[in-house]
Image (cartoon, rainbow, N blue to C red):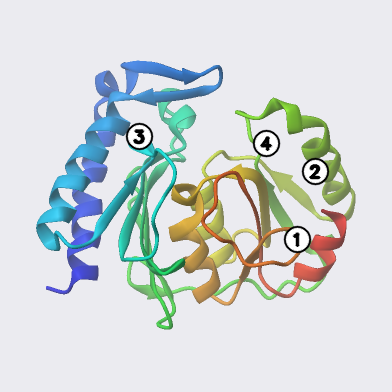
Amino acid sequence: MTLFASACQLVKEAGSLFADRDRASRIRKKAPTDYVTETDTTVQAFLRKRLASLDPSIGFLGEEQAEAPWDFSGPVWILDPVDGTNNLIHAFPHCGISLALAEEGRTRMGIVYNPWNGELFTACQGEGAFLNGAPVQASGVRRLSSALVAVGTAPGHREYAEGTFARMRRVFDHCQDIRRMGAASLELCAVACGRLDGFFEECLQPWDYAAGMLVASEAGGMVTDRHGQPLSFRPDQEVFASNGLLHQELAALL
């Protein structure tokens, strides 16, 4: 079994841990609006151990022990054990596991899994994007007035709220409608398969977007910052994704 296939299998195994509501109810506050549950820590411990057994030479960066500076010069797994922890706490079934393999500042492999509905989004660099093994493609929407756009509110950075909601209003005034769902990796995958035509959020970390960025890009979408620059795995990154056709028009509003 290839490294990619083995990693996909491990992520699906780890997804079974989401079903335990007692585990999800054991909550610790990291910051006023930032929480970690026992599910987060259990999933991370499980995947860290099992991924190391696949190839001990690959480094590891997980959200629940992510102290900068981070080293991306060699191969490293980038894991968000629960993307959408607040959703998990409230039993809102829009959260999942995001796992990327990065090297030299680029994502080589991306896996995003929502255990609530069994959707597994995958991509390897240069090989296209897939949902449960079937190819996916970003939408062909060319007019912002026909577009559905998701936004993130960066709840841990309320100091940016005024600007965030001003941009949200500008986009809302020009698009068909907006959505706020609370799991950036899944929003990026929704752009990849055409459910969304765009997505933006400020202050995201590499584990939030590393995997979904590759899935969206391999599906024909574009993922940059709002100035059109490539993402760089730095802390507090702004992430702007589109189907590619709307990128310039949306960027002007952001």
Task: Identify which residue is drawn at 71% across, 53% down.
Answer: 149
Compute the Cα span from label 2 to label 3.
Answer: 30 Å
Q: Secondary structure beneath disc 3?
A: helix
* Residue at 11% across, 73% down: 1
Q: Which of marks 1 and 3 is nearer the N terminus?
A: 3
Residue 52 has which mark? none
Q: Which of marks 2 and 4 is nearer the N terminus?
A: 4
Q: Name the residue under label 1.
A: 147
Residue located farthest toward the front when viewing the structure as drawn: 69
Label located before the other in sequence (4 or 1): 1
Instruction: Please name the amino acid that badge 4 sits on.
Output: Thr
The residue wearing badge 4 is 153
The image quadrant that residue 122 belongs to is bottom left
Q: Nearer the viewer, mark 1 or mark 3?
A: 3
Q: What residue type is labelled 1?
A: Ala
* Separation of residues labelled 4 and 1 (CA atoms): 19 Å
In this rendering, the label closer to the viewer, 2 or 3: 3
Dots 1 and 2: beta carbons under 8 Å?
no
Residue at the spot of label 3: 64
Decide if residue 242 is on the left or right side of residue 188: right
Q: Which of marks 4 and 1 is in front?
A: 4
- The residue tagged 2 is 168
Q: Nearer the viewer, mark 4 or mark 3?
A: 3
Q: What residue type is labelled 3?
A: Glu
Question: In the image, what residue type sits under mark 2?
Answer: Met
> Which secondary structure lies at badge 1?
loop
Give yes or no for contact between labels 1 and 3 (Cβ–Cβ under 8 Å). no
Q: How far apart are marks 4 and 3 (CA)?
A: 21 Å
> Which residue: 44% across, 31% down?
85
Q: Position of residue 227 (x, y in %)?
A: 77, 62
* Circles 4 and 1 in contact, beta carbons < 8 Å: no
